[in-house]
Image (cartoon, rainbow, N blue to C red):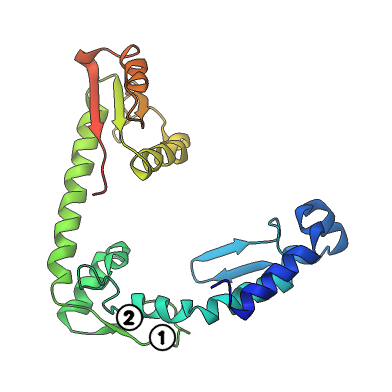
């Protein structure tokens, strides 16, 4: 990659634009950068104006992606091609985020769908594999079981503490969800009954000292331990 023309252009641009490290200064030189470096696509947007980048660098980055055939790899993923060469299968897990009714109806009628969810997309439509219906139902059943278990824990006032044991995303993911949803925790159940709040703890290291530190804060009789793993 470092020998590609686009990469060489990126190196030259980074060396010739030391002012890129001063975001405030870039706004003073180019007040319209907030508008020009704001990108929007269906269901997602990105504001690049507060990053160390300008239009030249963005153009060079796009050229690098083109040279490295990133678009082709993206299209192969969304078209259901066999991109997982180790297990010799497609990577269609993103479809599990679709509305269940839309997926099930498309599978039943053997319809093709737009993988981009974009009416203006020119991508090749995706024919859903027949086994996706069963897989989706399995995922939805597991989700329902998880929600039911979470509700039992929430209602059980004997459980005062929850300890999540996980590394990497299995630690950062639950922490992110907890922080993001904290404002919605009103301390009441759907029926309006008051619920005692739980205390949450996270253990993300193989070092026993971190676990011992958490154990000193909780009582075994009233603590739920969760072991999180994505593998």
Q: Residues within 10 Å of mark 2 (few under 14, many from 20)?
A: many
Vertical order, 51 against 77 (above or below): above
Q: Residue at x 87, y 57 (%)?
A: 28
On screen, 212 above or below 77?
above
Q: First in sequence, mark 2 or 1: give its number.
A: 2
Residue 43 appears at what percent x and percent y?
48, 66
Query: Which secondary structure lies at badge 1?
Result: loop
Q: Nearer the viewer, residue 13 or 30?
A: 13
Q: Is residue 161 above or below residue 72?
A: above
Q: Name the residue nearer the viewer: 42 or 11.
A: 11
Give the quarter of the image for residue 45: bottom right
Q: Which residue is the site of mark 2?
A: 79
Q: Is 113 situated left or right of 15 in this image?
A: left
The image quadrant of residue 48 is: bottom right
Q: Residues within 10 Å of mark 1 (few under 14, many from 20)?
A: few
Labels 2 and 1 touching (C-beta < 8 A): yes
Q: Is residue 36 visible?
A: no
Q: Which mark is residue 93?
A: none
Q: Does residue 167 appear in this view?
A: yes
Between residue 58 and residue 85, name the one nearer to us: 85
Disc on res. 123: 1
The x and y percentages for residue 96 are 27, 63
User: Does residue 58 appear left or right of residue 109 in this picture?
Assistant: right
How far across and how far down the image is residue 123, in percent?
41, 85
Indicate the position of residue 169 as horizontal and vertical percent values. Answer: 37, 45
Where is residue 100, by image quadrant?
bottom left
Please tell me whether mark 2 sits on a helix, a strand or a loop.
Answer: loop
- Report how many numbered discs are placed on residues in the image: 2
């Amino acid at each position: 990659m470092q020998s590609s023309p686009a990469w060489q252009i990126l190196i030259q641009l980074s060396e010739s634009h030391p002012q890129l490290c001063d975001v405030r200064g870039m706004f003073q030189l180019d007040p319209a950068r907030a508008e020009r470096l704001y990108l929007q696509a269906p269901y997602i947007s990105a504001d690049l104006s507060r990053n160390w980048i300008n239009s030249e660098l963005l153009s060079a980055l796009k050229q690098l992606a083109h040279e490295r055939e990133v678009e082709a790899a993206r299209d192969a993923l969304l078209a259901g091609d066999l991109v997982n060469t180790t297990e010799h299968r497609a990577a269609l897990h993103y479809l599990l985020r679709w509305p269940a009714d839309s997926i099930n109806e498309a599978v039943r009628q053997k319809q093709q769908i737009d993988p981009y969810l974009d009416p203006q997309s020119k991508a090749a439509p995706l024919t859903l594999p027949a086994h996706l219906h069963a897989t989706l139902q399995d995922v939805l059943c597991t989700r329902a079981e998880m929600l039911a278990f979470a509700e039992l824990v929430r209602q059980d006032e004997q459980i005062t503490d929850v300890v999540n044991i996980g590394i990497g995303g299995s630690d950062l993911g639950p922490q992110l969800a907890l922080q993001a949803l904290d404002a919605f925790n009103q301390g009441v159940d759907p029926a309006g009954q008051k619920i005692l709040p739980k205390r949450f703890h996270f253990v993300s290291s193989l070092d026993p000292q971190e676990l011992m530190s958490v154990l000193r804060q909780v009582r075994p009789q009233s603590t739920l331990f969760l072991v999180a793993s994505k593998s």
